[in-house]
Amino acid sequence: MSDIGFIVSFSPTTEREIELWRYLRKRRAVCVESLRLYVSMLGSAAGNLALTSLAAGGVYLGGGIPPKILPASKQGTFLKAFMAKGRFSDFLSRIPVRVILNDKAALLGAAHAAFEAVKD
């Protein structure tokens, strides 16, 4: 299990603080593993959708969660699950995957669609 980049500056000194520190380290491991599992499931689902739609032009991940978990997604778990599709893994390895960072992308897309609908 790899570190996701958390920095903790805490030096336990009493027995109670040491016990609390041990507890928090165990809980942190559960959180890190939960995030790794989520990223893996997201990668697998994105790979399935890429195959279903033959998304040779790319897969774009939008919404609130992908930008927030970007550091965890860059550790390889996402792409490994994305490409774990047997004989289709070579095809999937050529599909670019992007994360939409603009939190207004959905609103801009809806506005564009509305403008196009009333333009004619």
Image (cartoon, rainbow, N blue to C red):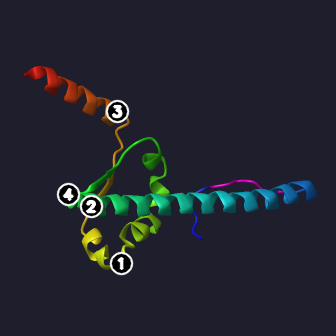
Circle 4 packing at 10 Å, graded few (<14), some (14-19), many (20+), is few
**Vertical arrangement, residue 107 with respect to residue 97, above or below:** above
Residue that numbered label 4 is attached to: 57
Can the viewer see residue 115?
yes
Magenta part, dominant SS: loop
* The quarter of the displayed image where residue 85 is located: bottom left
Describe the element under mark 1 as helix, strand or loop: helix
The quadrant holding residue 94 is bottom left
* Residue in the picture at 43% in, 68% down: 81
Q: Quadrant of the C terminus?
A: top left
Range shown magenta:
7-12
- The reply, left or right, for residue 68 in relation to residue 2 is left
Q: Residue furthest left?
A: 120
Give the number of the mark in front: 2 or 4: 4
Question: Type of residue at label 3?
Answer: Lys
10 Å crowding of disc 2: few (<14), some (14-19), many (20+): few
- Mark 1 and mark 2 lie on one chain; the one further toward the N terminus is 1
**Mark 2 to mark 4 CA distance (whole Å):** 7 Å
Seen in the picture, residue 42 relative to 103 is either above or below; the reply is below
The Cα–Cα distance between marks 1 and 2, rounded to whole angstroms, is 18 Å
Q: Residue furthest bottom?
A: 87
Location of mark 2 (residue):
96
Q: Amino acid at mark 1?
A: Gly
Pointers 3 and 4 in contact (CB under 8 A)?
Answer: no
- Nearer the observer, disc 4 or disc 1? 1
Callout 3: few (<14), some (14-19), or many (20+) C-alpha neighbours within 10 Å?
Answer: few
Q: Considering only order in the chain, which callout, 4 or 2, is on the residue closer to the N terminus?
A: 4
Report which residue position mark 1 lands on: 86
Q: Is residue 85 magenta?
A: no
Residue 4 in view in this figure: no
The amino acid pointed to by label 4 is Gly
The residue at 20%/29% (across/down) is 113
